[in-house]
Image (cartoon, rainbow, N blue to C red):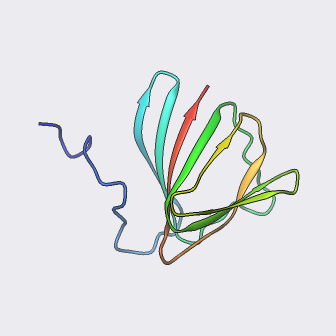
Amino acid sequence: MPNDDICTNLFHQPDQRLEIELTEKVLKSGAVRIERIISQGHTSPDDFWYDLNEHEWVSLLEGQAVIQFDDGSSKHLTRGDHCFIPAHTRHRVQSTSTSPAAIWLAVFFK
């Protein structure tokens, strides 16, 4: 039987308020990495942009969030929405909900 580190619940949230966003590795295999992220109103700093060397596919499992792109566009995500962000597409997290917290599932790959 698998141990508790292998079988967990994607919707589980900490009981306390998070000072910083919680990022947990769900799986890493070869060129693919899957992370679960919990945001409780957390955002990217005003002068910060993600510019990743890998593609990113994100799904918002719970809550709401807004991803802003450096071309001025933005994508509002609600529960169940997903978004593909090609490598080197500059983006940032503009907003996330607090109640319920935003729970992300992010898949990174080359």
The answer to whether 106 is drawn above or below residue 1 in the figure is below
| Quarter of the view holding residue 7 | top left
Would you place residue 24 above or below residue 20 in this image?
A: above
Find residue 95 and report its horizontal and vertical position in percent: 67, 68
- Left or right? Give the position of 40 relative to 27: right
Q: Is residue 102 left or right of residue 42?
A: left
Q: Nearer the viewer, residue 20 or 32?
A: 32
77 on left or right of 36: right
The foreground one among 74 and 53 is 74
- Of all residues, the one furthest to the right in this rendering is 71
Position of residue 23 measured from the top left corner of the image (x, y, whole percent): 48, 52
Q: Which quadrant would residue 42 be assigned to in this image?
A: bottom right
Residue at the spot 72% in from the left edge and 46% down from the top edge: 50
Image position, residue 66 (x, y; %): 68, 63
Q: For the N terminus, give its image quadrant.
A: top left
Q: Which residue is drawn at the image coordinates 77% and 40% (left, top)? A: 89
- Counting from the top left corner in percent of width and height, residue 75 is at 72, 58
In the rendered image of this protein, does residue 40 appear above or below residue 45?
Answer: below
Seen at 59% across and 41% down, the residue is 57
Q: Residue at x 69, y 31 (%)?
A: 53
Q: Nearest the camera: 71 or 28?
A: 71
Looking at this view, name the residue that lies furthest to the front.
80
- Marker count (numbered): 0
70 w.r.t. 26: above or below:
below
Quarter of the figure that contains the C terminus: top right
Tell which residue pokes out farthest to the left in this image: 1
Extreme top residue here? Answer: 30
